[in-house]
Amino acid sequence: MGTIFIIFVAGILTLVGSLIALLNWCSIIDYVLACRRNPRYANRGVDFIPLFGGLLLTCALVILVRGFPHIFSPKILWLGLVLDYGTLPALIITPMQDLLLKRIIRKKSTPKPRGPYCREIQLPFPLLLETETELRLICSAADLPPRDADFLQEAPGSILHGESDFQKIAQAHSRHQPGWWNRLRHRNDTGFWQIEVKYTIPRPSKPDKLRKLIAHYIREDDDIWTQFHDAPDLQRLLKSCTNFREILALGGLAGWWEPPADNAFNLPQLNEDNITEADIRQAAGTIRFQSPST
């Protein structure tokens, strides 16, 4: 074999084998960290690709040893089976896994959400969902974010704002861990994650906090919140809103969120002309709310 061909084939095998080895080591590290946070996960297997990465690395080393015997010694062939957790390390560690975890993991009870909580949304639609990055109109359960790997990591702490109360997403639980390998294969597969969501008991809402959040979005505008109206006008109208209904009405009139096609809740449509406080009051009075159970 030509020198260039040997280097090319060995390089490809090394690249793929190293990637698999890296994913496997990330998987075991993620597993140990998850067990430290919650000892219940110690009873679940580590999600890694067995043998394949180590075999590819070994093949790459065999090619290099055969092609360049004056540079590479046959003594290095065993390295491929050690560098990948899915080969020799897994065979050695797995039988001793329980013993090692007992030494590594500090036993502690599973953390629970603070305060009382329930399993379902109890606020009537329409709602506003506050996450770390957005404020979204929710008119039905179908409008909620899909319960996938991203939801499992990002949803806890999000807030649902309703007409007179608010609820937090206290906990999102799945029997699978969102590790590297699971996310690679099943990131958007809601059937795989089967996430159970627990919400806090509704508590009285405070319009001031919602107004401050929206005011922040208007100040940090990216041409969404001020697409149809100027920021000073929106800030003035926002200050005049005294409750959730009026904030919801202002959002519809200003084009912050679009009502659903059927508009069963009678949400106001976009008004590209000048919006007055009277427009907000009138639109707020006609909004209908509906319980999630109906």
Image (spheres, rainbow, N blue to C red):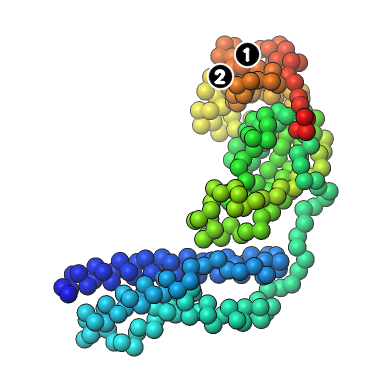
Look at the picture and state if 17 lies above or below 235: below
| Residue matched to label 1 | 275
Does the CB distance between marks 1 and 2 fall below 8 Å? yes
| Residue closest to the eye, 36 or 293 | 293
Q: Residue at x 68, y 43 (%)?
A: 158
Quadrant of residue 129 within the rendered picture: top right
Q: Quadrant of the N terminus?
A: bottom left
Q: Residue at x 61, y 82 (%)?
A: 96
**Three-letter code for the amino acid on which mark 1 is drawn:** Ile
Look at the picture and state if 66 lies above or below 281: below
In the current view of this chain or complex, which residue is farthest to the left? 2
Disc 2 element: loop
Q: Position of residue 33 (x, y in %)?
A: 62, 67
Q: Residue at x 72, y 12 (%)?
A: 282
| Residue closest to the eye, 272 or 257 | 257
Disc on res. 124: none
Q: Earlier in the sequence, mark 1 or mark 2?
A: 2
Q: Position of residue 84 (x, y in %)?
A: 45, 74
Q: CA distance from mark 1 to mark 2?
A: 9 Å
| Residue matched to label 2 | 229
